[in-house]
Image (tube, rainbow, N blue to C red):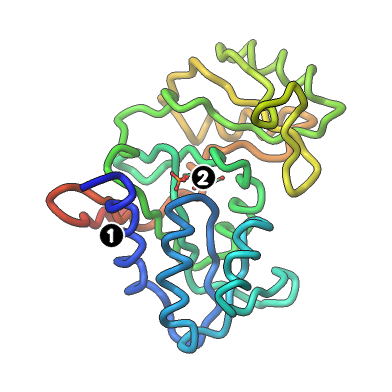
Amino acid sequence: MTQDELKQAVARAAIAYVVDGEIIGVGTGSTANFFIDELATIKDRIKGTVASSEATAARLRGHGIAVYDLNDVTGIAVYIDGADEITASGAMIKGGGAALTREKIVASVSRQFVCIADGSKLVQTMGAFALPVEVLPMARTAVMRRLAALGGQPRLRLKPGTEQAFITDNGGEIIDVAGLSITDPVALEQEINQIVGVIAVGLFAQRGADVCLLGTSEGVKTLTF
Ligand code: 5RP
C-alpha cells in the first residue's frame, strides 16, 4: 500500500470515533484532509466541527460541514488529527503543517484525542523530525539562542521558494529544531513552554493521544494509551 492509501485507511477507521450529534475537532495536514473527506459522507450525523487551521476550515466548509468558533462551543467530543512522530506511549511531535498552536488548543479541550497516522510515524525516540516551535516574530532570535542551548539546531522555517519567514495563521513564525533526542518529552515540553516569546511547542506529551490508529500493510492497528 502507498503512504496515501495508509492515510486514507486510518482516516476511514477514525469515523468510528465520531460521536453523533456532537462537535468534532478536526486537525490539519494530509491525513486530516483524508479524514475531512470521510467526515463529509456522514456530515448529517454531527452538529459541526472546530477547525485547527484556516486550511482545514476551508476544506470543511467546502464540503458543507459547519465550522464553529471555539469560543462558541462548550465542549468537543473528540479531536482527530495526524502527527509527524508518535511514540508507543502516545506522545507526539506535530506542527509539520504549521498548525501546532491551534491544534494544541483544540486538543486541550477535547474529551478524546484520536491520532491517525501511517506506520512510518511510530518511533521509539522522537527527534528525527525537527521539532516545530511557534514564536512571536520579535522574539525569534532570542528563542533560537535558547533552543540551541538545549542542544538543538534551530532553523527559521521559510515560505517555500522564498527567503521570507513562513507566517502562521496566528501571525507567528516557526522555528524547526533539528538534532534533539527527546527522551523526556513531558519535561522538554514544559521547558520550551517557559521560554518567553514561545507561542507553542509542537510536543504533545502533557496532553498526548488517547488512541492511535496506525496504518500498516497488515491493516489498521489500534494503540490505546
Ligand atoms: C500539522 C500537523 C500534522 O498533523 C502533521 O504535520 C502530519 O501531517 P500529515 O498528515 O500531512 O503527515 O501537525 O501542523
Residue pictured at 43% horizontal, 19% vertical: 181
Callout 2 secondary element: loop
Where is residue 110 shown, x and y percent of the image? Answer: 54, 65
Residue pictured at 31% horizontal, 33% vertical: 123
Callout 1 secondary element: helix
How far is disc 1 from disc 2 in space, using C-alphas? Answer: 28 Å
Where is residue 120 shown, x and y percent of the image? Answer: 30, 37
In the rendered image, the residue lying farthest to the front is: 161
Where is residue 202 shown, x and y percent of the image? Answer: 57, 38
- The disc placed on residue 206 is 2
> 137 or 126, which is in the foreground?
137
Residue pictured at 48% horizontal, 42% vertical: 205
Q: Reply above or below: 3 against 40.
A: above
Q: Give the quadrant of residue 210.
A: bottom left
Q: Tell me the kind of residue under disc 2.
A: Gln
**Apparent side of residue 106 relative to residue 81 in the rendered image (left or right):** right
Find disc 1 in the rendering and name its residue: 9
